[in-house]
Structures are given as structure tokens and as C-alpha cells.
Image: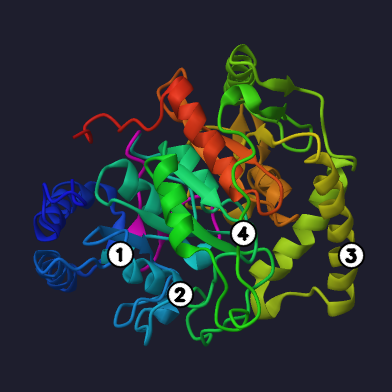
Amino acid sequence: MLRDGRIGSEELTRLFIARIEEHDDELNAIVVRDFDRALDAARAADAARARGESLGRLHGLPMTIKESYDIAGLPTTWGDPAAKDNRAQRDAVVVERFKGAGAHFLGKTNVPLNLADFQTFNAIHGTTHNPWRRGHTPGGSSGGSAVALATGMTALESGSDIGGSIRNPAHFCGVYGHKPTLGIVPTRGHQPPGVPQSAQDPDLAVVGPLARSAEDLALAMEILAGPDVLEAPGWKLELPPPRATSLADLRVALWPDDPLAPVSEQIAGRIREVGERLAAAGATVSDTARPAFPTSLSHQTYLPLLDGMMAGPEGELKYFDWMGLHGRRGFLREQWRQFFEQWDVVLCPISTTTAFPQDEEGGFERTLRVDGDERPYFEQVFWAGLATVAYLPATVFPTGLSEDGLPIGVQAIGPAYGDRTTIEVARLMAQEIGGFQAPPGYGG
């Protein structure tokens, strides 16, 4: 509608603002609002269109973005009260690229403290609620992003991911999320408050889009992917096309459960059901194919690297130890490369349960009930780590609701630089089983 002129940018922006004002008091997703500048940009977009000028593929599109990205003039706090007065001086690269494609920003969405939880709450902005069931987590750390999308308060979002922070909110809220191959979307302008912007990407961490369709993920990646200033003089990115354009052409390995992070039967069963639909459509499907390494090796490589990143200056990971883990990671990456010579994607969980009740006490000593068993809270990060430690792309797509009415997302992991393949699998599955559905009370 926006592209063909059936609605103007200012009109659409005002519709989103009205929706935010109607719903966000009860959800608390969009915690930094920039409506005046958004309306100015929308009017400029309409004027440009009237002159016959194009601002790009997102001409006049209003959107939001995770609070942890820098937007010049707006606070970037990462939920830390010590940084409540921090104001960004310049835009993050992702913000620049979205603006360069013609989009503008309504505001920024909520995060947990230091982006370090599967829930979204902090002492500055409070708690963000899952629109499918109040009192349940929307996921984290891009929880505000997923809620804003699910409830129609934004058209597009971008999050960040080191331990599932794009993927588990997509699963918990019933939207789409993509963790890119490490290094293909610049992270400059997504750093803790007080740390200068740098074109040097951190280990493990990526930034990437969330959306209400696989098509929107693909469009966002076309806009975002490519080298930053340090690499741009020497290389350009050419991601390979999807490996298949129909379900019948896919080779799919199912990984529905694992002893290192047992999954609820509803989620494991959903992955098996998706496998059955794929097989019926003509795909080659296996529930035994695995890369040639012990699962524990992957997890034992990922956890100390993750801990070292999340601990910040207080971390105890020495460079010599990091080099050993990095060498082990090289072995894992090679085994995955060989595995993906025979298979196109792995379908697996991103979390051990559907959205669980909010629990803001106890930190990572909390527990999580999985089919009646009390399990360590942090155990669920296993499923994020499979892709993260090996730099692999992974797309989470909705597959419908659980028996108790909560979304279930499935994670598609692909080969390094196979971002278009995992997103295409999400698109094809939407054609087969249906895609995004709005939470009750948030349709339209």
C-alpha cells in the first residue's frame, strides 16, 4: 500500500502512533518514543514521492528498533540505570542502512539489563509483557522488538543475538527472527553504553531483523548485509541463492530433542510434525543425521566463550584459553561444513518450552519447569549455541500454537552464508502450514 501510493507515509506513521498509544501502556514494548522526528521524516518522504523521487526500498516506512542500537539524540542504556543519561551521538550502521533505504524510526524497544536474560525487564523502563499471555515472558533480549511486531505497533524491527536474543523472542511471540552468519551485518553502533562505536565486530554476537513474514526478513537482509568501513575497500558480500525453491527439493535433518537440554514434548512433537509435512511434500527428511562431533563438544566450546563475552571486563577468560576454544570452534565449523554438503538445513528448537511465567528474582539460579521437571534456567541456551558457536545462520519461524494457546517457533539452521536458504525455508513453510497470526485482541 505504501509503495503503490494507496497510503502516505504520514498517514501510516500516524496509524502506528495511534496503535502504540492504544496498546503499549499494557505491553510496555516501545519505551523510547520519537514521534515528532518520525512525523517530520514521514512528511519529507511524502514530499519526495510527490516529486517523483524514491528514497529507497523502504520509502516512508515507519519502524522501531531495539533500545541497544544507537540513534543519534536518543538514549542508549541497555537497561542499566548507571547509563540512564547516555545519549547517542551518531546512528548505528543498521540504523543508517534502514534510513538509507527510506525508513524512519518511531522509537526504540525494551531490553533486559545488559541484554542478558530470556525475559525483558529493567530498572529504567520496567517489564515488557507477552501479548499472548500477560505475566509470561516475551523472550529476551529482543523482547520489546517481538512484542511490537506481534501486536502491529511496528512494521519491522532489528535485534541482536548472542544467546538466542533474536530467536527466542520470535518463538515466544509468534513472529519471524533471523540470526545472520557472523560478520555479514555490521554491529558498529550496537555496543554497551560508554564504549565507543567500533567497526570491529565482537565474538559470537550478531545483529539482525525480526518481522511478521519471511519475505520481510529477506528484504531487511538485502538492505543490511554487507561490509562496514574497515572491510569495504577489499571485499563485497555475495550470499548464495537459496538451495531450494520448493519443499520437495529440500534435504532436512530433524533435531527435536537432546539430553543436554531436554525439550517439552509439545515442542519436540511440533518439530516432528513439521518433518512429516515436509516428507509428505517430497522433501528428504532424517531424524538421525547429525554433524560428526559430540554434541557436548559444541556446548562446552560455546559456554566459556559466551560467559567470557557476557562477563565484560570482569570476565576471567584469558587470551590463551580463548585461542584454544577458537581452535576447537574451527573443528566444529569444518564438521558443520561437511554436514551441509549432504543436508540443507537442521530443524530444531530454540527454547525448551513455550513462553514461561515471568520470574524477575533469582538471576540465572532460577529454574524452568519442562514437562513437570525442574531444569536449570540457563540450560535452554544450548539450542541457541548450536548455530552461534559455529557462526551459522538461523531463522525462527512460527508454526502455530501449543495446546494451551502459546506460539511455537521452529529454528532452521543452515550452512555458513546460507542465510537465504534458512529464510526461504521459513517462507516455504508459511505456504505449507500458515505463517504469522496476531495475538487475540491485536488483529487488524
Residue under label 4, please give it.
Answer: 162
Q: Amino acid at mark 2?
A: Val
Between the C-alphas of marks 2 and 1, the distance is: 16 Å
Residue 375 screen position, x and y as percent: 68, 37
Between the C-alphas of marks 4 and 2, the distance is: 18 Å
Viewer-nearest residue: 288 or 59: 59
Figure check: 177 above or below 253: below
**7 on left or right of 406:** left
Residue under label 2, please give it.
Answer: 93
Number of other residues with Cα within 10 Å of mark 4, as a class: few under 14, some 14 to 19, many 20 or more: many
Q: Which residues are magenta?
A: 116-132
Q: Amino acid at mark 1?
A: Gly
Between the C-alphas of marks 1 and 3, the distance is: 42 Å
Q: Secondary structure at mark 3?
A: helix
Kindly indicate the quadrant of the structure image that contains residue 231. Answer: bottom right
Residue under label 3, please give it.
Answer: 327
Between the C-alphas of marks 2 and 3, the distance is: 30 Å
Viewer-nearest residue: 393 or 27: 393
Between the C-alphas of marks 1 and 4, the distance is: 30 Å
Q: Which of the marked residues, 1 or 3, is nearer the chain's N terminus?
A: 1
Q: Which of the marked residues, 2 or 3, is nearer the chain's N terminus?
A: 2
Residue under label 1, please give it.
Answer: 56
For residue 328, the mark is none
